[in-house]
Image (cartoon, rainbow, N blue to C red):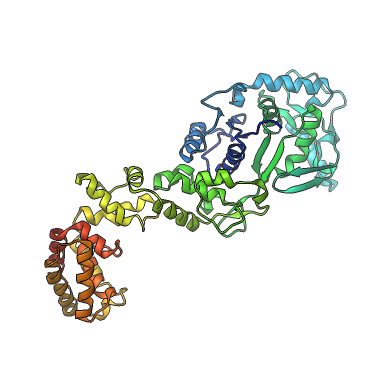
Amino acid sequence: MKPVRTRFAPSPTGLLHVGGVRTALFAWLIARQAGGSFLLRLEDTDKNREVSGSGDHIQESLRWLGINWDEGISIGGKYGPYMQSERLAIYKEWGQKLVDAGRAYADPYTAEEVDAFRQEAKAAKQPFLYRNHRPENPPAWDGSQPLRFRSDPKSYTWQDAVMGELSTGPEAIDDFILIKSDGYPTYNFCHIIDDFLMECTHVTRSQEFLASVPKFLNLYEALDITPPTLVTLPFVMGPDGKKKLSKRDGAKDVLDYAREGYLPEALVNFMATLGWNDGTEQEVFSTDDLVAKFSLDRVQKSGAKFDEQRLLWLNGAHIRALPLQDLYARTDTFWPESAGGYEEDFRKQVLSIVQERLKYFAELPSLTSFFFEEPTTEAVQTLLYDESNKQLRKLSPEQKQTLLQAAYKELEQSDFSFTDLEQRLNNLLVTLETKPGILFSLIRIAVSGAPFSPALFDTLHVLGKDTSLERMQRALTL
């Protein structure tokens, strides 16, 4: 048995999105579970579509997610170079092997001539096949003309690790370009050479390449290469489940999630379960869980729907599982500006009571700002008279003031420990014959000026007696 070696080989033509990351993740999981190697290669042979900085962005995204590679771009390895633009001599050598074997030829046709062939097939209502127009005496290949593969059309049946047994007829196989006239190879050619030379045992890629597999198999035969294990992943579908996920549907740059304060392990959890499950009801997985439990036979064949609400829920679940010190370290850049003047211990207290509600770190300012700055008069007054509050809108201003005044007097006697606050305010509910949704809402609005806040007793305890009473007194004047 060969050691398992997998790879991720993106083109640096833009930002890395969910679909691409999931392909990388599954390849990484295959390698990690088998104790094998995972490598990163950049397929930068389409210079017209290359985006400056894209290669660095891909690496930064994978590192943030914890999808670290054992060899490849930036770290090297014995099978380098790992940038395809630095391997042109290798592809030329292999191209010449095919020429010498009679399995490749210099393409002498102009674009206009090829278009004429295409129109001729269209007029005859037949599919256009390049192999029907092979030149009888092609010129010697000197690199100035495209090098085209001389296919050997035949039927194929092959096994895919996810899709199972697949087959196709000879009509799916045609002559295709191996090396362009600019000296750069096509993906169809160079990935096969690189995977062979780098001893990759598994090739993981998206469903969009499935139709090309027969011509890959034809080329493997011509090169006398045994194909690796083919792993075809179903598409990540849009939220409606009807079409492939696109930017329009919310396919964000992976690093946008970092900027919004998502946890990398939550995003990895989410992507791993896009089309895979371990056969149980478990939904929250650590990365170690995924490595231990992942298997290709549990990857589904149909597309997996991208549900951002589920990602939000998973991120909240991972946040709640973090020890407070770890959570505090990760939220360092997300606090409201006004928190800068407060001691670390106080900020940790605040964080401990919002941890249960926090879904992503960019929410931190809206959930905590009232701990560090007094709510505005406008905010408090608006909420006191908010007609959408079904319980408070039934009360007159005098009734609200009476309830808030009673709460103020009771809290004046409190030592503001959690237990004392809980006991006093719950007893006050009985004395005033009112409900938590009324009394506690009035207190919460007075001290926070926010439509929602953490548990009231926790909030009062952390704000402290002086601040809480001062804010309640101000609300009473409104």
Quarter of the image where the C terminus is located: bottom left
Look at the image and tell me in which quarter the N terminus lies: top right
Is residue 462 positioned above or below 385 on the image? above
Give 452 or 137, whichever is nearer the viewer: 452
Is residue 396 at all visible to an observer of this figure? no
**For residue 9, which quarter of the picture?**
top right
Q: Is residue 452 visible?
A: yes
Q: What residue occupies the far right of the structure in this picture? A: 136
Q: Position of residue 30 (x, y in %)?
A: 62, 40
Q: Position of residue 79 (x, y in %)?
A: 62, 23
Image quadrant assignment for residue 391: bottom left
Q: Is residue 335 above or below residue 404?
A: above
Q: Is residue 125 left or right of residue 208?
A: right
Which is nearer the eye, 450 or 378? 450
Is 248 in front, or is 390?
A: 390
Q: Is residue 41 left or right of residue 473?
A: right
Spot occupied by residue 143 in the image (x, y as percentages of width and height): 72, 20
Q: Residue at x 18, y 76 (%)?
A: 403
Q: Position of residue 435 (x, y in %)?
A: 27, 77
